[in-house]
Image: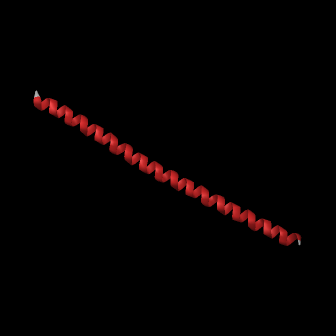
Amino acid sequence: MLHGLWGDKFYMIQSILLVIVVNTIILITYWSSVRMLLRCCYYLNSFAFSLQFFFKQLQNFILK
């Protein structure tokens, strides 16, 4: 009886730990991917801004 009870408790603790570990891994991968996406967006925006600036300069140069 005692062994069965301890086994159930151990199984419960193991499943809780497994859930925590899985959630932590998911959160870490989610956060790193979100940060990567934000960084990509930032780089794309700055690239688009520099292109816009370059074309504006080119337009000014051509119009002169």
Residue 6 at x, y percent in the picture: 15, 33
Q: Quadrant of residue 45?
A: bottom right
23 left or right, relative to 52: left
Q: Quadrant of residue 23?
A: top left
- Where's the N terminus, which quadrant? top left
Which residue is located at x 60 percent, y 55 percent?
Answer: 41
Which residue is located at x 34 percent, y 42 percent?
Answer: 20
**By what rule are the colours in the image chosen?**
secondary structure
Total numbered circles: 0
- Where's the C terminus, which quadrant? bottom right
Residue 28 at x, y percent in the picture: 42, 50
Which residue is located at x 57 percent, y 57 percent?
Answer: 40
User: Which residue ends up furthest to the top in the rendered image?
Assistant: 1
User: Which residue ends up furthest to the right in the rendered image?
Assistant: 64
Residue 26 at x, y percent in the picture: 41, 46
Residue 43 at x, y percent in the picture: 61, 61
Residue 16 lies, with reference to residue 62, above or below; the image says above
Residue 57 lies, with reference to residue 9, above or below; the image says below
20 left or right, relative to 30: left
59 left or right, relative to 5: right
Which residue is located at x 88 percent, y 69 percent?
Answer: 63
